[in-house]
Amino acid sequence: PLPRLFLEDVPLPCESLPPEFHVDELMKRNLLWLAVHFVASLDFRPGPSTLGEDKPKTLGANLPAISVLASSLSRSRILKRLNLRSSALGEQGGIALATAIGQCQHLRWLDLADNKLGPRAAVQIAHAVEKGNGLEVLDLSCNDIGDEGMRGLAGHLLNCRCLTELHLSRNGLGGQGIDALVEALYACLSLRVLGLGHNKIDLAAATCLLQVTVATGALKELRLE
C-alpha cells in the first residue's frame, strides 16, 4: 500500500486546514500546490496581523504564487471551496486565474470579492465559469466591474446552468449594466440568490429587476440594500 501523506500532523487529503496554515505561511513554505491538490475547502484570505510584525502578504503581491495556484487549480480533483477575498489579485492576477478556475472540476464555491479585478478580468472569469464544470456560488463584489464589465459578464451568464448564487455588490453598476443583467436573468434560470447592494440602481432599474424576478419565478432572493 502507498504511504499516508501528512502536512505536519494533518493527514491528507482533508476537508480543511488548521488556522495556522494561512496563505502567507503556505507561500513561505512553497506548499500552495500541496494544499490545492489535497484539501477540499481552502481559505486563502490574508492571515491575521500581529503586533510588531509585517503585514501578512497576499497572493496578489506574489506573482509566482499566483502561477503556482493557477497550475494547481487546473489539476485539482478535490477542491470544492476557494476563498480569495481581499487577496489584492488585481486585473493581472484575475486573468491569470480565470482559465484554471474553469478547469477545476469539482469547484462549487468561489469568493473573489474585493480584489480590484476590473471589467476585463471579471468577464474572463465569467467566461471560465460558463465553460467550467458546475460552479454554484460566485462572489465578485467590490471589483470595479462597472457597466462595461457587466455587459460582457451578462453574456456569459446566459449559459451558466449550475450557478445558484451570484454577488455583485459595490461594483458601480448603473442603468446600462442592470439592463444587460436583466436580459441574462431571463435565461439564467438556475440562479436563486442575487446580491446587488450599493450599486447605482434607480427606480427604473429596480423595477426591471422585480419584473424579471416575477416573470421567471426562479430568483428567490434579490438583495438591493
Image: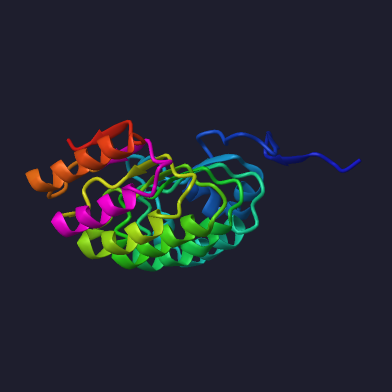
Q: Please name whichever residue, 62 or 77, is drawn nearer the observer in this view of the structure.
A: 77
Quarter of the rendering containing residue 124: bottom left
- Magenta residues span 175-195
Instruction: Assign the N terminus to one quadrant of the image.
Output: top right
Report the residue at 21% width, 60% height from top.
146
Spot the residue most to the left.
203
Q: Quadrant of the C terminus?
A: top left
In percent of the image, x 45 and y 55: which residue is there?
Answer: 159
Q: Residue 39 or 121: which is nearer the viewer?
A: 121
Can residue 50 be seen at all in this image of the molecule? yes
Colour convention of the picture: rainbow
Q: Position of residue 39 (x, y in %)?
A: 62, 41
Nearer-the-camera pick, 71 or 149? 149
Q: Point out the residue furthest to the top here.
A: 220
The location of residue 116, given as percent across then percent down, is 29, 58
Query: Could you say where residue 163 lies in the image, as x and y percent from the top left?
Result: 44, 44
Give residue 62's position: percent from left, percent from top.
Answer: 45, 63
Place residue 127 in its image quadrant: bottom left
Q: Residue at x 27, y 59 (%)?
A: 150
Q: Is residue 192 part of the magenta span, yes or no?
A: yes
Residue found farthest to the right = 1
**Residue 35 shown left or right of residue 222 in the figure:** right
Whether residue 202 is visible, yes or no, is: no
